[in-house]
Image (cartoon, helix red, strand yellow):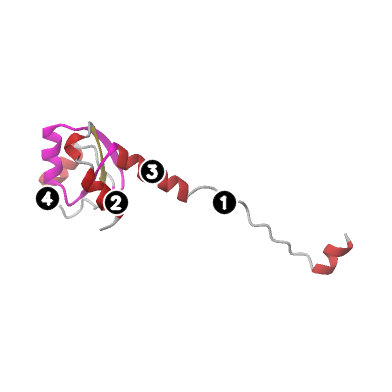
Amino acid sequence: MSAFKAFKAQAPVSWSPNLYITLVRGMPGTRRLHRRTLEALRLRKCNRTVMQCNTPSLRGMLQQVKRLVVVETEEMYKARKENLAKHQALRPPLVVNHLPASANESS
């Protein structure tokens, strides 16, 4: 089991006050009821994330569209964003010298 799935198993969604919901599959080809549910969740485009308060009605909506979305707790969302920021961090520039070796020695 991956570390993410192990962490996900330890943090029950029902205990978290806020949920981060990300649409990971597109809406074309889905049922009209599922599209209406996603619009009610304010998810209109793929890979967009919204934060909602954790209520029983929200969990019922998520149960209806569970194959289209990913639900994360606040800790999971922050850890994922932190890892993404580390991955995209600026790296030092690569300096390439195009002058021949003899020109570098004389100057």
Q: Amino acid at mark 2?
A: Phe
Image quarter of the N terminus: bottom left
Between disc 1 and disc 2, the foreground one is: 2
Q: Which residues are magenta?
A: 46-74
Residue at figure coordinates x 35%, y 39% from the top left? 78
> Which residue is under mark 1?
91
Measured in 3D between alpha carbons, the distance from the residue under mark 4 to the one under mark 3, in whole angstroms, is: 31 Å
Measured in 3D between alpha carbons, the distance from the residue under mark 1 to the one under mark 4, in whole angstroms, is: 45 Å
Crowding at mark 2 (Cα within 10 Å: few <14, some 14-19, many 20+): few
Residue 83 appears in the rendering: yes
Measured in 3D between alpha carbons, the distance from the residue under mark 1 to the one under mark 3, in whole angstroms, is: 18 Å
Between disc 3 and disc 2, the foreground one is: 2
Residue at figure coordinates x 15%, y 52% from the top left? 30
Residue at figure coordinates x 24%, y 47% from the top left? 8
Crowding at mark 4 (Cα within 10 Å: few <14, some 14-19, many 20+): few
Q: In the image, residue 98 lies at what x, y percent?
A: 74, 64
Circle 4 SS class: loop
Residue 31: image tag: 4
Is 107 situated left or right of 92 in this image? Answer: right
Q: In the image, residue 58 lies at what x, y percent?
A: 15, 35
> Which residue is under mark 3?
81
Q: Amino acid at mark 4?
A: Arg
Find out whether residue 94 is within the magenta segment: no
> Which residue is under mark 2?
4
Circle 3 SS class: helix
